[in-house]
Image: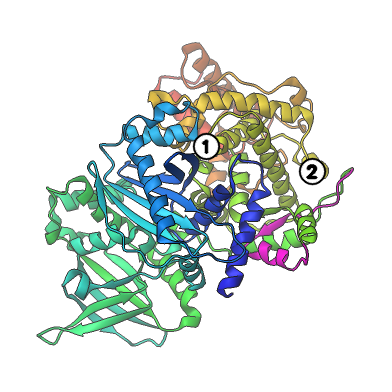
Amino acid sequence: MNFEEFFEEFKEQIEILKDNPDYGWEAQDYFTAVMLDYLEEVGEVDSPIICPYRAHGVQLNAYTFDEDFETLNIYVSIFYDENEVKTASKTDVDAALKRAMQVYRRATNDLYKSFEKDNDTYEFAHSVFEHKDDIKEVCITALTDGNCKPIPFKNILIGDAEVSFNIWDMDRLFRCMSSGKMRETIEIDFDSQFDKHIPCLVNKSCDDYEAYLAIIPGDILAEIYMEHGARLLEKNVRSFLQVKGAVNKGIRDTLRNEPEMFLAYNNGISVTAESISLGTDENGGLYVAKIRDMQIVNGGQTTASIYNIIKEKKSEVDLSQVYVQMKISVIKNQDRMDDIVHKISECANTQNKIQMADFSSNDPFNRKMEDLSRVIWAPATPGQKSKNWFFERARGQYADMLSREGTPAKRKAFKEIHPLFTKTDMAKYENTWNQMPYYVSEGAQKNFKRFMVGVKERGNFLPDERYYQLLVAKAILYRRTEKLVQEQKYGGYRANIVTYTIALISHKTAQRLNLEQIWKEQGLSGALESEIVRLSSIVQQYITNPPGNANVSEYCKRKNCWDGLLELDVDVSNQLKEELISGELTTGVLSSSSNASSFLNEATKEEQEIIDWVCTIPASVWLSISKWAKDTNNLQPWQRGIAFSVGTLVGRGKKPSVKQAKQAEIIYQSAKEKGFVEE
């Protein structure tokens, strides 16, 4: 693909997004969403929040905060919307960056008072105001559909925060996307950047790769991560790097208390590279002078922990005593590049299930979904043509199909007949239906990774025609909910309201919505639409009033947000109950005897053992736990409900679902700890 074709495809992505439900956006906001979607895919952005705000002298299009509110990224768009790539002038870029900088200045004061509490911009401004003393770095990035000549930016200080500037134009994005690596190439010049030698040993015994063993000083590794961040991490293992869990805490404690022992205690990092330049020191020893396309495939936790420790206690931690073992693999066989890098990543990360998942579009699950979506057509409905829902396994497939339609009218007709949904859409629909809205709220890429972890944990599951049909039904449910929520004009947090509303309906109906009927009719019933509107209002009120005046977006990412919603005394209407498919109505999931609508309800060997154990406990015990918990005000209402439902199922000789069994095990142990005695 040449640049002109890439630009045409990019514009088509904007047009495709415009066909989705009305967000109340302007053209530049759709451009922002597409640009950030590309950048998130290549690891330049992490879960951006689209937040259009324009007033005299100020502009904000999107932003991200890190978990500790120490780093703020602000994105401001320069959208020309031309048929050909326009030159973005320095004047335009400077003006956009100044408008974004002014937004930050005002937000550190009292900008938040200008907005209602349930407004997206309120959350941005209030978060900046609340954490202005925590913010250490602000990166303002201009996004443009033009091309810009190199501009030398200088960092400035606003209060205690260092403000840096960046720009992504079409040429830079094209080079990144067409490099074959789906990311910008990182080059490290140890000689010129750090004036230090990195001694190494070399092994060139294999035709496919060369191996280098080196020891890198901790302060240099921290500086490299400071400059390049998560882009250093090979895409298949880029995940959650906060200092949490036993491994990371151990790394942190060693750095603080025994930095000189770090090399002995830590396994080091594994790196792949396109090439290495070697030098010879005064004693004739080899050292690494340069690394091109450095990617960490194992050791992301180590690297991020070293970086985080200097942020936390810069004056107390001496990284001059910290050294890290570094194994570098230079892949010489370009034809096997992807395969070798993936296997290095997989074998180096066997201790971590998340990192074991292959998130590529070539995964057999996604390939099978693509095959199904090309041949299965939805039934024709009155006044509507039959539809073929198009699953986009790899970016650009849909735009490529559209490009074959000769006229605007034909392209419009193609879009109507072939609605698009992507891999991240699929994950959003499934994890919402499976009552994990807190994962969906984390953002498209993180949620997709979590979904694929679930796919991997189920073994070699491949979707079939029924799975595809029910997935499309969930897509219809989700998209119609988006429109209904938008019509309510709540003011903000639309994405969170949608996923939590559908998850709540899934729970309250025990996943007994008639998805087959939705597939056949390609639409929702009046009763279901009325419930979506009613329950979305309850959800909106709930999530926009988090405990402790917490950040709404961050609160929605936590499971306790979902647990709290389930504690509300809410039920679905009798009209909707009349439409539910037959089956045992439990507290939110189908029993194993019911016709489950997602493969994620299938049990692994370990989960089946839990189900079998639950069934060894007499039904009378489960029912007694439920009554005891109610009488003594122990457990949560939904837990009491699960105990009752499990007792009912066991009494009928039926087995609970995976989710029910897991919760039942926790409930049983908790009841025992609190003094419950079996009669």
**Which amino acid type is marked by label 2?**
Gln
Q: Is residue 389 magenta?
A: yes
Q: Which mark is first along the chain, 1 or 2?
A: 2
Amino acid carrying mark 1 in the image? Lys
The residue at which mark 2 appears reads as 522
Identify the element where label 1 is drawn.
helix
Q: Is residue 399 left or right of residue 418?
A: left
Percent from the top left, x then y, of residue 236?
46, 62
- Whole-percent x, y for residue 454 in the image: 55, 51
Question: Could you tell me which residue is drawn at 16 percent across and 60 percent down?
Answer: 322
Residue 386 visible in the snapshot: yes
Q: Main secondary structure of the magenta part?
A: loop
Identity of the residue drawn at 66% across and 31% down: 487
Q: Residue at x 40, y 60 (%)?
A: 90
> What residue span does the magenta drawing correspond to?
383-407
Along the viewing direction, whichever of 531 and 490 lies nearer the viewer:
490
Q: Residue 326 location in percent, x, y?
A: 26, 69
User: Which numbered tag is attached to residue 662?
Assistant: 1
Q: Which of the colour schemes (rainbow, by chain, secondary structure, one colour) is used?
A: rainbow
The vertical placement of 326 against 283, above or below, is above
309 or 15: nearer the eye? 15
Residue at 52% x, 56% y: name it.
Answer: 35
Whether residue 567 appears in magenta in the rendering, the answer is no
Q: Judge by depth and name the residue closer to the eye, 428 or 253.
A: 428
In this rendered view, identify the residue nearer to me: 105 or 555: 105
Q: Quadrant of residue 199?
A: bottom left
